[in-house]
Structures are given as structure tokens and as C-alpha cells.
Image (cartoon, rainbow, N blue to C red):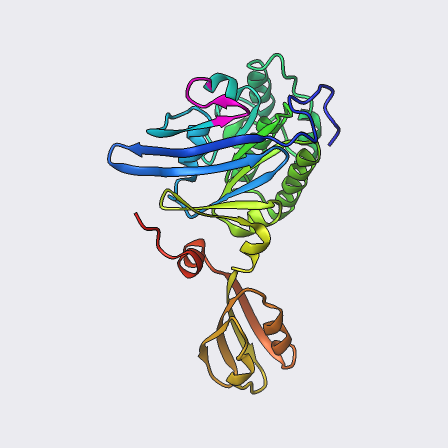
């Protein structure tokens, strides 16, 4: 990605709180959205916002963008109040929503051109580069695009003006692994030029690829802010392995490993933290088959963060 031809609104090297949230609360009638949420995201940071579906991630984002107003608390984005200066907040943000709603009769080219007109002072300097990198055909109408190609179009739309802040809600949904890899590469290039990213996801591997810190939200409350390396130690994997030879259960007496089910040839294991010791045991035997699955975020929360007290 080539550097933009205009100067960033921020000075690279000057660390500031691009997003500052203080006791932010949003209720929908009697229903909880988020409660007393406080956090800061620094300039140049890729901050992961992690939680299961329904935890309050999208509510937080919509409040930050001024699409809904909070019930209580306050927040600023790039120094602007999210309630009283919501227009200024949105002027230099690239936003990827979690739900897609495109004009079905427009081609990709027409859609990008249409939205470019709303920002005459912010030329789409990265458009051509992004279209090439995500290999998107702009001549097709959006209603004809696959879910993955629609997601590519939304990504280009959000990033093409080279905004200083990216707010991304489940940005890789529908992308194949190759395009996901390219997307994370683009984010790192943005970061290298002093840009800031607020990345919301319910998929732990997504935030591990790019984020330095993550805020973990559950039932509308922020339960932890962790360094990504700390989160990695809280991984839980479920392993099913079938051996051709006989294996003793005692061989899996390893810290962090629970044997859920076992006979001489088939094992079901629950592994917390590092998987390397388990792989080393498996390598001593003849493996016929194995399945490794990551635990859901809900399971990780119950294991390491417990229930949120109200």
C-alpha cells in the first residue's frame, strides 16, 4: 500500500487517546446494552474488542459513531464528544459494520463513486490499490456478489479514503483465508503509518493476528483488558486423537491437560495454554487421526473470567 498524498490529522510519534470511554452505558428500555464501560485506545494501536455474540460490542461501536446515544457516561473519539460532536467524529473514520446493507442495483464502481461524493475533501487515494489487492470485480451489481465479495467491497469503501481511525465490527466475515491474510496485512500497514484500529470480533484467532491489547466484554460489562500474550495463555483446545498403537493414559499427565475420555487407542483431551507438550507425546506414537478445535469464547470466559456480577 502506498503512503497517502496528504498529511494525517495526527502527528506520528505523539501518543494520544484516540478513543476514551468513561462509564458508558446504554439501555434499550429495560434491556441491557452496555454498562459502566471504561477504556482507552491509544494512537497507533490495534485494539481488539472481544466477546461472544450479544455481549455489547456492536452497541459500543454504534455509540462511538453517534448512530445511537448512550443512556449514561461519556466518550470522545479523536477528541470529539460522541453526542455533541458526532458529525466531527465520523469525518475521519473508516467503519465496517457487522451487517451488510448495500444498494442492490448499483455496481461496485457506482457504489464507491457514490460514497466518495460525501467526502469531497478526502479523496479515495487507496481505492485502486485495495481493489487490486482484494481482487474485486467492480463491474458487477452488488446483488450479484457473493457474501465474501460484498465484504471486500465494504472493506474498500471503509479504507479507501485512508482514515486515521478504523472501527471494524467483525470485518473478516465471509472472507476466505487468503483474503483474511491480506486484510490483516493491510491493517498492519495502516498501523505503521500511525493509524489506529478498533477491531471487534467474537473469534479469538482474529484478534490474536494483529492486536497488542484486547478488551474483553461479557454481558455488557468490560471484564478485563489484557495483553494479547496473556490471552494466548488462556487458550483452550479440544483434541480428539486416535492411535494405531497402545497409549497409556498416564502419558497425558501434563499441566493444563485434562483427559476427558480414554481407552488404549482413542483419547479426548482438554488442553489449557500451550499445546506443544501434547504434540510431543503424540509424536512418540503412531497417529491414525486427530481433530483439534478451539473452545468457544463462552467456554473461555467461564473458565478464566467466571460469571459477571451485576
Look at the image and say whether residue 5 sits in the magenta stretch: no
Query: What range is drawn magenta here?
Result: 76-85
Location of residue 53 (image quadrant): top left
Residue 245 or residue 75, whichever sits in front: 75
Residue 271 or residue 291, whichever sits in front: 271
Q: Quadrant of the N terminus?
A: top right
Q: Main secondary structure of the magenta part?
A: loop
Tell how many labels.
0
The answer to whether residue 172 of the structure is visible from this angle is no
The answer to whether residue 38 of the structure is visible from this angle is yes
Q: Position of residue 281 (x, y in %)?
A: 61, 78
Residue drawn at 54 percent across, 26 percent down: 141
Q: Position of residue 249 (x, y in %)?
A: 51, 84
Q: Is residue 184 left or right of residue 2?
A: left
Q: Position of residue 215 (x, y in %)?
A: 49, 44
- Residue 23 to residue 178: above or below: above
Amino acid at each position: 500500500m502506498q503512503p497517502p498524498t496528504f498529511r494525517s490529522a495526527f502527528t506520528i510519534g505523539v501518543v494520544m487517546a484516540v478513543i476514551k470511554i468513561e462509564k458508558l452505558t446504554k439501555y434499550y428500555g429495560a434491556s441491557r446494552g452496555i454498562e459502566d464501560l471504561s477504556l482507552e485506545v491509544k494512537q497507533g494501536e490495534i485494539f481488539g474488542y472481544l466477546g461472544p455474540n450479544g455481549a455489547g460490542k456492536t452497541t459500543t461501536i454504534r455509540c462511538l459513531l453517534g448512530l445511537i446515544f448512550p443512556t449514561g457516561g461519556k466518550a470522545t473519539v479523536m477528541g470529539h464528544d460522541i453526542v455533541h460532536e458526532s458529525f466531527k467524529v465520523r469525518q475521519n473514520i473508516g467503519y465496517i459494520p457487522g451487517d451488510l446493507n448495500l444498494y442492490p442495483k448499483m455496481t461496485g464502481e457506482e457504489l464507491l463513486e457514490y460514497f466518495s461524493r460525501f467526502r469531497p475533501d478526502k479523496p479515495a487515494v487507496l481505492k485502486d490499490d485495495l481493489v487490486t489487492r482484494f481482487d474485486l470485480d467492480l463491474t458487477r451489481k452488488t446483488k450479484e456478489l457473493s457474501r465474501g465479495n460484498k465484504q471486500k467491497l465494504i472493506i474498500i469503501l471503509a479504507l479507501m479514503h485512508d482514515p486515521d481511525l478504523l472501527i471494524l465490527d467483525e470485518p473478516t466475515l465471509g472472507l476466505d483465508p487468503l483474503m483474511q491474510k491480506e486484510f490483516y496485512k493491510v491493517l498492519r500497514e495502516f498501523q505503521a503509518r500511525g493509524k489506529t484500529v478498533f477491531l471487534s470480533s467474537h473469534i479469538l484467532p482474529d484478534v490474536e493476528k494483529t492486536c497488542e491489547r484486547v478488551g474483553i466484554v461479557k454481558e455488557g460489562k468490560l471484564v478485563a483488558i489484557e495483553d494479547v500474550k496473556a490471552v494466548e495463555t488462556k487458550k483452550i483446545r479440544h483434541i480428539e486423537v486416535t492411535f494405531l498403537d497402545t497409549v497409556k493414559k498416564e502419558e497425558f499427565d501434563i499441566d493444563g491437560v485434562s483427559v476427558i475420555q480414554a481407552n488404549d487407542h482413542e483419547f479426548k483431551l482438554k488442553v489449557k495454554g500451550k499445546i506443544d507438550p501434547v504434540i510431543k507425546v503424540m509424536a512418540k506414537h503412531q497417529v491414525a487421526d486427530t481433530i483439534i478445535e478451539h473452545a468457544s469464547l463462552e467456554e473461555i470466559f467461564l473458565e478464566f473470567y467466571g460469571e459477571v456480577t451485576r
